Image: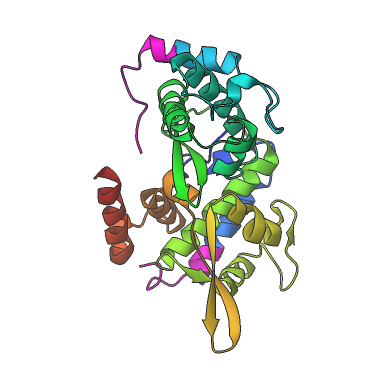
């Protein structure tokens, strides 16, 4: 199962930074002090796994995966996948769902968006007739067997998000993955504290104040190519949404939380992080952001 972005709190912040590096705590300390210097107080002002899963669902899901084809990125010529000539029975539905799940996990390794058109082309033999039936089975198996939710983000695109609160203390990440998660969380925190949107110019200025980038130099020893991560990787992975804005004849960009961030990171985690940065300041001392957090929590529960 792929590693997911875990919520960053006071207790697990340092887990995101490689424990093997002696200067990792220095990175956190300099980042925290930089945030305190840069962010003024005026602008700084989901669900445990479902119980009772049936063993039949688990067995069906695992059997479906074991029957899945390994040829996920080519057109299928097998007649069993030609669903345009007849309705499929339950076993065919489970078999196809297993193939789709294998495909989804292959795509998800790099957190790429899962596209409906690719599922239809690569798994369903190019026909849409049984897509709805199969995708509903896929959603059920992903949730009941693996603890994932397949989220429709519109325009025939899906992302996979974890339904299980990740609290495994011994889970280890590679240094590059940890670095990306740290940078991403810092950026998401900045956007939230700017009331859920900030311009690209403001974001670069923020990262310069943290000495993560320098003027036009976006390379960092720990984080890597920061500009590529922000403008391409995080946007492509749906953690960030990049929106064009126009002022007169000039075009600029602003960043918001993307759909994956909305499902994997909570505003409460952000405020708890800021509490640590400001040495224990109450999260309620940011009244505007506290109310925004409560509104998001209420909407997610309804």
- Assign the magenta stretch its main secondary structure: loop
Percent across and percent down for residue 194 are 43, 68
Question: Which residue is nearer to you in this view: 237 or 278?
Answer: 237
Eyeballing the image, is 102 above or below 206?
above
Q: Is residue 55 magenta?
A: yes
Instruction: Point out the image quarter for the N terminus.
Output: top right
Q: Who's the residue at 61% across and 40% down the image?
A: 118
The range drawn in magenta is: 34-58
Instruction: Mark yes or no: residue 4 visible.
Output: yes
Rendered image quadrant of residue 151: top left
Looking at the image, the residue that sits furthest to the bottom is: 248
Question: Which residue is nearer to you in this view: 161 or 132?
Answer: 132
Q: Who's the residue at 31% across and 53% down the image?
A: 296
Question: Which residue is nearer to you in this view: 109 or 137?
Answer: 137
Question: Which residue is nearer to you in this view: 293 or 75?
Answer: 75
Percent across and percent down for residue 248 are 54, 89
**Is 129 left or right of 172, judged from the image as shown?**
left
């Amino acid at each position: 199962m792929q590693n997911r972005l875990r919520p960053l709190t006071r207790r697990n912040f340092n887990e995101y930074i490689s424990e093997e590096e002696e200067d990792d705590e220095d990175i956190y300390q300099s980042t925290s002090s930089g945030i305190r210097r840069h962010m003024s107080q005026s602008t700084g002002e989901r669900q445990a796994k479902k119980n009772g899963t049936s063993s039949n669902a688990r067995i069906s899901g695992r059997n479906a995966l074991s029957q899945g084809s390994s040829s996920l990125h080519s057109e299928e010529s097998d007649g069993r996948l030609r669903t345009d000539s007849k309705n499929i029975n339950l076993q065919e539905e489970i078999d196809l769902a297993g193939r789709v799940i294998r495909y989804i996990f292959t795509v998800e390794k790099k957190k790429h968006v899962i596209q409906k058109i690719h599922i239809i082309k690569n798994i369903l033999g190019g026909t849409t007739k049984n897509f709805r039936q199969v995708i509903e089975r896929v959603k059920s198996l992903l949730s009941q067997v693996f603890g994932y939710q397949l989220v429709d983000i519109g325009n025939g695109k899906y992302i996979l998000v974890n339904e299980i609160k990740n609290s495994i203390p011994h889970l280890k990440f590679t240094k590059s993955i940890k670095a990306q998660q740290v940078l991403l969380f810092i950026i998401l925190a900045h956007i939230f504290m700017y009331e859920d949107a900030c311009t690209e110019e403001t974001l670069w200025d923020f990262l310069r104040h943290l000495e993560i980038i320098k003027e036009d130099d976006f390379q960092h020893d720990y984080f890597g190519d920061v500009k590529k991560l922000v403008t391409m990787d995080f946007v492509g992975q749906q953690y960030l949404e990049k929106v064009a804005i126009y002022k007169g004849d000039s075009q600029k960009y602003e960043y918001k939380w993307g759909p994956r961030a909305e499902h994997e990171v909570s505003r409460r985690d952000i405020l708890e992080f800021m509490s640590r940065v400001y040495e224990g300041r109450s999260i309620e001392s940011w009244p505007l952001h506290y109310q925004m957090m409560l509104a998001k929590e209420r909407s997610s529960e309804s």
